[in-house]
Image (cartoon, grey):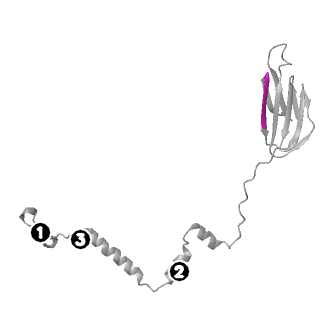
Amino acid sequence: MSNPCPKDGPETAWQRSAERKKEGRSTRGFGGLLAVVVIGAAVSGCGSDDKSDKADSAASAPASPSAKASEEAPAATHAADPAPTQKAEPTTVLTLTGSGTKDTKAFKVGEEWTLSYTFDCTKAMAAVGGKGNFIVFDKEDKLVNELDKTGKGSSTQHTSGTRRLQIISECDWSAKVTT
């Protein structure tokens, strides 16, 4: 039995270990067993002369997805990613100013185009002190419908082809189509 009281005399580590072994306890415990298992596993893998298993496993399981892709596809030259392009300045397709109702001439646009407009109804509505109406149609589609003394805005459209606008207003206005 170990000496729990240091005042009874010094006891060496060997004496404590010997007493624990007599009682069925070991000081090495689980850590010692774990070390033996790890060393045994490492040694068992080192002595193999069979290289075919390693070659087959390396060929069948690439180290990374990119390695797998490079094995499956033949080498190709990759062009550098294009530099980010700056959006080109809009091209003006149609510019109009006027007052009252107006039908535009036909004009062609691509998939996306923008109608920008301003209107001023202060002169036209001065006598009644009210608001004026500003409406723009594209065929049968109403693109703009505003009721105010003055205003401005834009409307982006996604219909390509030949277009014709109809502007209906009692106000002074300007309209511009850009692509």
Which image quarter: residue 174?
Answer: top right
Please report contact status of discs 1 and 2: CB closer than 8 Å, yes or no: no
Looking at the picture, tell me which residue is in the foreground, 25 or 152: 152
Magenta stretch in the rendered image: 148-155
- What residue lies at 32% left-to-right and 74% top-to-bottom? 37
Residue pictured at 9% horizontal, 65% vertical? 3
- Give me the C-alpha separation between circle 1 and circle 2: 57 Å
Circle number at residue 55: 2
> What residue is disc 3 on?
28
Q: Residue furthest bottom?
A: 49
Labels 1 and 2: the sequence-earlier one: 1
Horizontal and vertical percent position of residue 130: 80, 16
Of helix, strand and loop, which mostly describes the magenta segment? Answer: strand
User: Which SS class for mark 1?
Assistant: loop
Q: Nearer the viewer, mark 1 or mark 2?
A: 1
As drawn, 173 above or below 4: above
Q: CA distance from mark 1 to mark 3?
A: 19 Å
Residue 112 % position (x, y): 80, 44
Question: Which residue carries the number 1 mark?
Answer: 11
Dot 2: within a 10 Å radius of its alpha carbon, few (fewer than 14), some, or many (20 or more) residues? few
Which one is in front in this view, the residue at disc 2 or the one at disc 3?
A: 3
* Kind of element beneath mark 3: loop
Instruction: Please identify the quadrant where the N terminus is shown.
Output: bottom left
Q: Amino acid at mark 3?
A: Arg
Find the distance from the CA under tag 2 to the CA under tag 3: 40 Å
Residue at 78% x, 32% y: name it.
153
Q: Is residue 30 shown above or below 163?
A: below
